[in-house]
Image: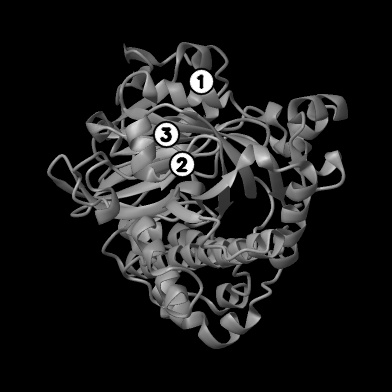
């Protein structure tokens, strides 16, 4: 147990502000997660963030917290608009990395492995996977890139890549205001030919089965039915967003002294929100946010086409409806506790409660779904935030969170252990050695992570989804 943590209440701990800290650090962990928590470095990163100008109330660690670049993965930091900072590293390398969930009318138990493999092949034929892969829709990059960066998923749907009703089920209606490609470097733009590509690392397309319903009314409202096939997509802004983060992290490191900002860590490079560098970063970040929404929208279009081919049926008859698409690496202007804030979520998902005015109309009465994937061999969850989530700036965890680094996972997990953990789940990469860093054993217990917030009323569990087949790319 980290020596400075003080228990406040069930599953909630803090480190009171001392010295030059401007806010307390608050972290959410169950007793079991705390017992196995080796995250001293991650907590130090939260403490480092707490010294930045304008940091408001608490710097927060989610139950899936682990060490990142600057702010840890599973970190939430809000800064006052009037005197606070914006930090590229506190958004993350993969700007608007996020998750979207589709449902279907297909009974999961009616699918045999042969059909699942045909689906995987059809999807992979359309969607390149792995690091550095180029789009099979290159004409969109060549002819419409600026429009897509400024218009997000909205622009693609205008062009016929999706249904109009999809927009009701995407954070920000698929269009993040403030994007300006003029704030993006030529190098970043040159890395933009990756629409409808998955990437590597922890990104995936998961074909699963809705295995359990926890709240039947909410599940019905979300269009989630027990026993049906679901599709989950986890990817972000690819090389485009990565380059924007790199570019502006360097700019902010160089500019910080000009604004009398002493950086505790270069990964927390930041500038005042209203500075020229801060304004330009926000425009560039918004461009990457829209790119990521468009990326997941185009992947959805390709998946729908693949299902139509395999089942020889119009995809609309198969369902394939969008439940929600939510970001987990982003900075957004929001109002909390009567203050105008810029909320940085890095590996954290927004989860607005029922009645919150920022919900999309589709979910104003229920609160929007928050989608929390587990590892490639374990359950994923759909939850919804409650009014108690105001204490986390309406944020919840974004996944299970790592317990082993990628290098340690490759070193410590054997072929036999990996295969045992995967069981009958199909996966796309032929050699297990290429997936050891993503093995279930490399991650925390997703049930424990999700229950940490559910047990104290910050979230309600709506549904659990078990993977049947997982498509991943190689690093």
Q: In front: mark 3 or mark 1?
A: 1
Can residue 322 be seen? yes
Q: Which is nearer the N-term, disc 3 or disc 1?
A: 3
Q: Which residue is at 37% across, 64% downward?
A: 165
Q: Residue 371 — which label?
A: 2
Count the numbered circles shown.
3
Measure the C-alpha gap from mark 2 to mark 1: 16 Å
Can residue 72 be seen? no
Q: Which residue is at 47% across, 39% downward?
A: 225
Circle 3 SS class: helix
Colouring convention used in this rendered image of the protein: one colour
| Vertical side of 59 occupied by 338: above or below | below
Measure the C-alpha gap from mark 3 to mark 1: 22 Å
Residue 109 in picture, x, y percent from top left: 65, 37
Near-viewer residue (400 or 277):
400
Tell me the crowding category of disc 3: few under 14, some 14 to 19, or many 20 or more residues within 10 angstroms, Cα based: many
Residue 330 in picture, x, y percent from top left: 41, 53
Near-viewer residue (106 or 144):
106
The residue that mark 1 highlights is 448
Tell me the crowding category of disc 2: few under 14, some 14 to 19, or many 20 or more residues within 10 angstroms, Cα based: many
Q: Which residue is at 68% across, 59% downward?
A: 311
Circle 2 SS class: strand
Circle 1 SS class: helix
Near-viewer residue (245 or 359):
359
Residue 344 in picture, x, y percent from top left: 37, 48
The residue that mark 3 highlights is 46
Q: Residue furthest bottom?
A: 143
């Amino acid at each position: 147990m980290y020596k400075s943590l003080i228990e406040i209440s069930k599953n909630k701990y803090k480190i009171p502000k001392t010295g030059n800290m401007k806010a307390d650090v608050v972290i959410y962990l169950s007793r079991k997660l705390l017992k196995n928590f080796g995250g001293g470095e991650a907590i130090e990163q939260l403490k480092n963030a707490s010294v930045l100008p304008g940091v408001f109330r608490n710097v927060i660690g989610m139950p899936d917290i682990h060490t990142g670049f600057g702010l840890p993965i599973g970190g939430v930091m809000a800064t006052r608009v009037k005197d606070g900072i914006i930090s590229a590293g506190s958004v993350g390398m993969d700007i608007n990395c996020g998750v979207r969930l589709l449902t279907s009318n297909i009974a999961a138990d009616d699918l045999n492995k042969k059909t699942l493999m045909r689906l995987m092949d059809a999807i992979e034929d359309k969607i390149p996977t792995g690091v550095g892969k180029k789009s099979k829709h290159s004409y969109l990059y060549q002819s419409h890139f600026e429009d897509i960066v400024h218009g997000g998923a909205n622009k693609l749907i205008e062009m016929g890549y999706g249904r109009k009703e999809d927009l009701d089920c995407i954070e920000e209606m698929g269009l993040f205001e403030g994007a300006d490609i003029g704030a993006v470097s030529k190098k970043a733009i040159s890395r933009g030919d990756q629409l409808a590509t998955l990437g590597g690392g922890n990104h995936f397309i998961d074909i699963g089965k809705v295995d359990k319903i926890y709240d039947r009314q909410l599940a019905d409202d979300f269009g989630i039915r027990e026993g049906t096939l679901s599709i989950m997509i986890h990817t972000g802004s690819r090389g485009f967003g990565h380059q924007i983060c790199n570019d502006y992290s360097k700019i902010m490191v160089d500019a910080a002294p000009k604004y009398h900002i002493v950086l505790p860590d270069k990964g927390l490079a930041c500038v005042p929100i209203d500075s020229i560098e801060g304004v330009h970063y926000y425009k560039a970040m918004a461009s990457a946010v829209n790119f990521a929404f468009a990326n997941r929208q185009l992947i959805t279009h390709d998946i729908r086409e693949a299902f139509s081919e395999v089942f020889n049926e119009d995809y609309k008859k198969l369902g394939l409806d969008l439940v929600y698409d939510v970001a987990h690496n982003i900075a957004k202007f929001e109002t909390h506790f009567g203050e105008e804030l810029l909320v940085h979520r890095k590996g954290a998902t927004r989860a607005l409660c029922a009645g919150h005015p920022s919900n999309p109309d589709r979910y104003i009465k229920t609160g929007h779904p928050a989608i929390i994937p587990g590892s490639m061999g374990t359950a994923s969850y759909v939850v919804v935030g409650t009014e108690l989530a105001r204490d986390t700036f309406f944020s919840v965890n974004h996944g299970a969170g790592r317990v082993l680094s990628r290098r340690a996972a490759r070193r410590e997990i054997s072929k036999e252990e990996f295969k045992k953990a995967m069981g009958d789940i199909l996966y796309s990469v032929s050699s297990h050695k290429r997936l050891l860093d993503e093995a279930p054993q490399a991650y925390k217990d997703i049930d424990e992570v999700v229950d940490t917030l559910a047990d104290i009323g910050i979230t309600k569990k709506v549904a659990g989804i078990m993977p049947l087949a997982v498509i991943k790319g190689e690093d």
